[in-house]
């Protein structure tokens, strides 16, 4: 397909797919000029995380009278308060420390010594979170969204009882209710999280000391990111994973390279390993382990254990049973293509419904759901949702893995290009990684793109746009990319897919 033809094609709609930190573990909230029992809203959103607050703002922009209920007392959900944002702050700060220790001298920048000021590092993280949460409140005021701080539950499909943070109670009425209460940490049988020695991701973001030995249970996005933070700061990090591979949603070839990269950073992996029990009664923590398939038990000792085994929908106390909202066995609320539940007027978005538990997926859900409510058309394609692991190097991907394409029986081509052959990566002495493009053999239509590199999470969006518009690898290959840039590696991988690369 020629680029000019592609440019004229009518845009299809939006995104969302498979990855980690999520939307809002909150439910509901009340203060800011709350609605009285006699006021009726066009839209009431329960939950002020990425899905909820975006839905509320979009609804107000479409002229709908809107109230958002949030129990935490600050907007932004798990993502902004104890997830995506604070973790990225610590990932960046710890990376700077690691670079100062191991890389600056190669660039002619030398120190007599460098040390970690953990309280200052945590302070920078907290400042970023505070500024962003206040920013969302400002957006609510700008768009005239009524903000209610408190915990809400259904009285009827159009009435929400809210126990306010001030200790009162009010009833908020709405023609349309959107459940956007996000997800919570998934616990493991027999393991009690105290957020001190046995922590969730929330506790791992607020440790007051650098643990000498950190054990991470679960080799998904969150576990690997938090393991990277504390590993850079000096912890001995061991990741225990029940499955045979880390990050099972990742392309197999890229996954292997990614694991090798983390192992070079001294992160240890115990795959195919089951945690039988955790004992935190002593000074440290003792984990009893055995092979996933059964076998001899071993003991692993740690100062801190991070439980990172996934997340589950957060619907506790919502009163879904009161109004008869249907859920599946995993506790996810069942919705149709318009995000409507089986109860008229009640909708759900984000982590509480099937689909990838990702903040950006929840945002797209929120926009589309409100557009449907307003009588417009909305759409979210979960196959077009990018996933990113924010370690160093980062891994980002969109579309199908090679394993998925094989299982579909599709004839395909693969083009790869290493960052070792990319001039910008070599110039900055940060060239570990690869771009992998998978395209249908006959049509050359791109089926999936997988990137491991510094800032892969920024590079992936060219690929997301390409998949959204049904582009071919030749379309990317014939698009001029500025030189020298890391993005040229995607161009070269696309060239390798349909023909041959120039610089390899």
Image: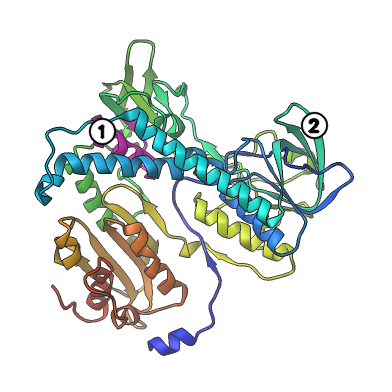
Residue carrying label 2? 169
* Image vertical order of residue 1 relative to residue 195, above or below: below
Q: Considering depth in this image, is 433 or 40 the residue closer to the camera? A: 40
* Image vertical order of residue 349 relative to residue 274, above or below: below
The x and y percentages for residue 498 are 26, 80
The x and y percentages for residue 144 are 72, 54
Q: Give the quadrant of residue 70.
A: top right
- In the picture, which quadrant includes the C terminus? bottom left
Real-space Cα distance between discs 1 and 2? 46 Å
Q: Residues within 10 Å of mark 2 (few under 14, many from 20)?
A: some
In-image side of 468 versus 502 (left or right): right
**Image marks 1 and 2: residues in contact by CB distance under 8 Å:** no
- In the picture, which quadrant includes the N terminus? bottom left
Q: Mark on residue 233?
A: 1
* Image vertical order of residue 383 relative to residue 110, above or below: below
Q: Mark on residue 481?
A: none
Direction right: furthest residue: 38
Q: Is residue 223 magenta?
A: yes
Q: Is residue 25 magenta?
A: no
SS of the residue under disc 1: loop
Identify the residue at image location x=23%, y=73%.
483
Residue 400 shows up from this direction: no
Q: Which residues are magenta?
A: 215-237
Q: Give the quadrant of residue 238.
A: top left
The x and y percentages for residue 433 are 22, 58
């Amino acid at each position: 397909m020629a680029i000019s033809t592609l440019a004229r094609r009518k845009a299809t709609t939006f995104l969302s797919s498979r990855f980690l930190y999520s939307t809002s573990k909150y439910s509901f909230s009340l203060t800011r000029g709350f609605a009285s029992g006699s006021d009726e809203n066009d839209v009431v959103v329960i939950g002020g995380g990425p899905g909820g607050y975006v839905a509320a703002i979009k609804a107000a922009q479409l002229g709908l009278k809107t109230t958002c209920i949030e129990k935490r007392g600050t907007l932004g959900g798990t993502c902004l308060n104890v997830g995506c944002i604070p973790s990225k702050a610590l990932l960046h700060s710890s990376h700077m420390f690691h670079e100062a220790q191991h890389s600056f001298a190669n660039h002619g920048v030398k120190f007599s010594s460098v040390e970690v000021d953990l309280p200052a590092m945590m302070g920078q993280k907290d400042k970023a979170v505070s500024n962003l949460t206040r920013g969302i409140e400002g957006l609510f005021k700008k768009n005239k969204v009524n903000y209610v701080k408190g915990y809400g539950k259904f009285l009827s499909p159009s009435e929400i009882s809210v126990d306010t943070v001030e200790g009162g109670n009010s009833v908020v009425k709405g023609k349309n209710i959107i459940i956007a209460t996000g997800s919570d940490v998934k616990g493991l049988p027999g393991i009690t999280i105290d957020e001190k020695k046995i922590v969730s991701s929330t506790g791992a973001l607020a440790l007051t000391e650098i643990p000498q030995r950190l054990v991470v249970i679960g080799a998904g996005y969150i576990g690997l990111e938090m393991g990277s933070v504390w590993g850079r700061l000096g912890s001995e990090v061991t990741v225990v994973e029940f499955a045979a591979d880390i990050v099972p949603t990742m392309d197999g070839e890229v996954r292997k390279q990614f694991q090798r990269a983390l192992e070079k950073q001294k992160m240890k992996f115990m795959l195919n390993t089951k945690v039988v029990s955790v004992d935190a009664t002593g000074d440290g923590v003792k984990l009893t382990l055995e092979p996933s398939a059964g076998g001899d038990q071993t003991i692993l000792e740690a100062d801190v254990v991070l439980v990172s085994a996934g997340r589950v929908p957060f619907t506790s106390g919502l009163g879904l049973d009161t109004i008869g909202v249907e859920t599946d066995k995993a506790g996810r609320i069942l919705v149709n293509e318009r995000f409507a539940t089986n109860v008229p007027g009640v909708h759900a978005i984000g982590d509480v419904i099937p689909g990838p538990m990702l903040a950006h997926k929840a945002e797209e859900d929120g926009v589309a759901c409100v557009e449907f409510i307003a009588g417009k058309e909305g759409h979210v394609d979960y196959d077009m949702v990018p996933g990113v692991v924010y370690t160093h190097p980062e891994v980002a991907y969109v579309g199908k893995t090679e394993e998925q394409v094989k299982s579909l029986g599709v004839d395909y081509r693969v083009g790869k290009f290493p960052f070792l052959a990319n001039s910008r990566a070599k110039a900055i002495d940060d060239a570990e990684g690869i771009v992998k493009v998978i395209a249908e053999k006959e049509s050359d239509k791109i089926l999936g793109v997988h990137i491991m590199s510094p800032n892969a999470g920024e590079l992936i969006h060219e690929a997301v746009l390409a998949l959204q518009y049904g582009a071919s690898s030749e379309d990317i290959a014939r698009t001029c990319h500025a030189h020298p840039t890391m993005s040229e590696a995607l161009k070269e991988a696309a060239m390798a897919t349909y023909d041959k690369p120039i610089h390899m």
